[in-house]
Structures are given as structure tokens and as C-alpha cells.
């Protein structure tokens, strides 16, 4: 299954932040896929590293359930991203500005994600964002 970086990224974002569907999110990853959140402090409530599709599914399902009440919603029309390909065809970088609906103009959160893919799925995702977003 060969997908472009654009297709992989859009599928990941739709399954994750926009629909909070842990099953669909997990299916974007290889069986041994890894999510790393290097900026989270040690001992944070959310793990800094998730290994394997099933751990990703379970941890994200619990996280989305906790987020359900009173959480901010990303605004797809106001949010923006740029994908950067690299000399390695299995690596791309997403530069993201997510706008959350709220009072006034909403809040913008900027982050960078580095994707390493294998066979059209995410093998490793490094997510660099403000750690307070996970509280």
C-alpha cells in the first residue's frame, strides 16, 4: 500500500485531532509503529513513547475519552500546514499551525512532526509541541 506523504498526513490528522478515532488513528501505523513525544517531561501523565499499533490504539482511546468533555476543537478551515519532503523518501516533516475554536479569534498552536513511513504507514512519528497541551 503506497500512499503519498499528503495522503498519510491527511489520514492521520483526520483520524486523530479532528475525529478522535483511536481505531482509525492506530491503523495509520505499522504493527510496530512508534509515537514519540520528546518534549514531554519525564513522569508526565501521558507517556513520552508509545510502541506498537495496539498500545497506540489503547492509549489514544483513553486520551480521547478524557478529552471529550470541554475540550477544544481544531478548526480545519483556519488551521494550516506545510509538508516538507526530505532526501529520504520515507521521511517527511509537517509544519503545523492548528487553530482551536474558542472565544474571539481562537488559539493557534504551532508544532512540528517528523514522520518515518514504511509500506504506506507511519513507522515512527516524533511530535514536537508544547507539553502543556497534554494536560
Image (cartoon, grey):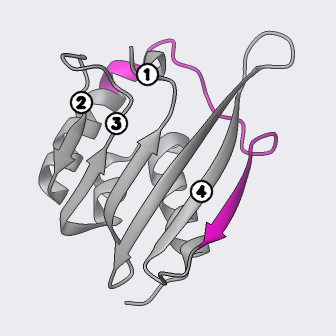
Q: Residue furthest front?
A: 87
Q: Report how far apart the C-alphas of labels 2 and 1 lie in the structure.
A: 18 Å
**2 or 1: tag closer to the N-terminus:** 2
Regarding mark 2 in the picture, which secondary structure is present there?
A: helix
Between 24 and 41, the one nearer to me in the picture: 41
- Give the class, few, some or many, for how many residues have Cα within 10 Å of label 4's Cα (few <14, many ≥20): some
**3 or 4: tag closer to the N-terminus:** 3
Tag 1 near tag 4, CB within 8 Å: no
Tag 2 near tag 1, CB within 8 Å: no
Left or right of 27? Residue 134 is: right
Left or right of 130? Residue 77 is: right
**1 or 4: tag closer to the N-terminus:** 4
Which residue is labeled 4 in the image? 94
Regarding mark 4 in the picture, which secondary structure is present there?
A: strand
- Give the class, few, some or many, for how many residues have Cα within 10 Å of label 3's Cα (few <14, many ≥20): some
Regarding mark 1 in the picture, which secondary structure is present there?
A: helix
Above or below, comparing residue 90 to residue 116 in the picture:
below
Q: Which residue range is magenta in the image?
A: 65-85
Which residue is labeled 3 in the image? 38
Queried whether the magenta region covers residue 31, the answer comes back as no
Q: Residue furthest bottom?
A: 1
Amino acid at each position: 500500500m503506497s500512499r503519498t506523504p499528503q495522503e498519510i498526513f491527511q489520514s492521520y490528522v483526520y483520524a486523530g485531532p479532528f475525529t478522535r478515532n483511536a481505531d482509525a488513528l492506530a491503523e495509520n501505523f505499522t504493527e510496530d509503529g512508534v509515537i514519540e513525544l520528546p518534549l514531554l517531561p519525564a513522569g508526565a501523565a501521558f507517556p513520552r513513547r508509545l510502541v506498537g499499533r495496539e498500545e497506540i490504539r489503547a492509549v489514544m482511546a483513553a486520551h480521547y475519552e478524557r478529552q471529550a468533555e470541554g475540550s477544544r476543537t481544531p478548526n480545519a478551515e483556519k488551521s494550516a500546514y506545510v509538508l516538507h519532503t526530505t532526501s529520504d523518501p520515507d521521511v517527511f516533516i509537517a509544519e503545523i499551525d492548528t487553530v482551536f475554536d474558542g472565544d474571539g479569534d481562537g488559539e493557534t498552536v504551532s508544532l512540528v512532526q517528523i514522520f518515518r513511513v514504511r509500506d504506506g504507514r507511519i513507522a515512527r512519528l516524533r511530535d514536537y509541541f508544547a507539553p502543556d497541551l497534554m494536560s
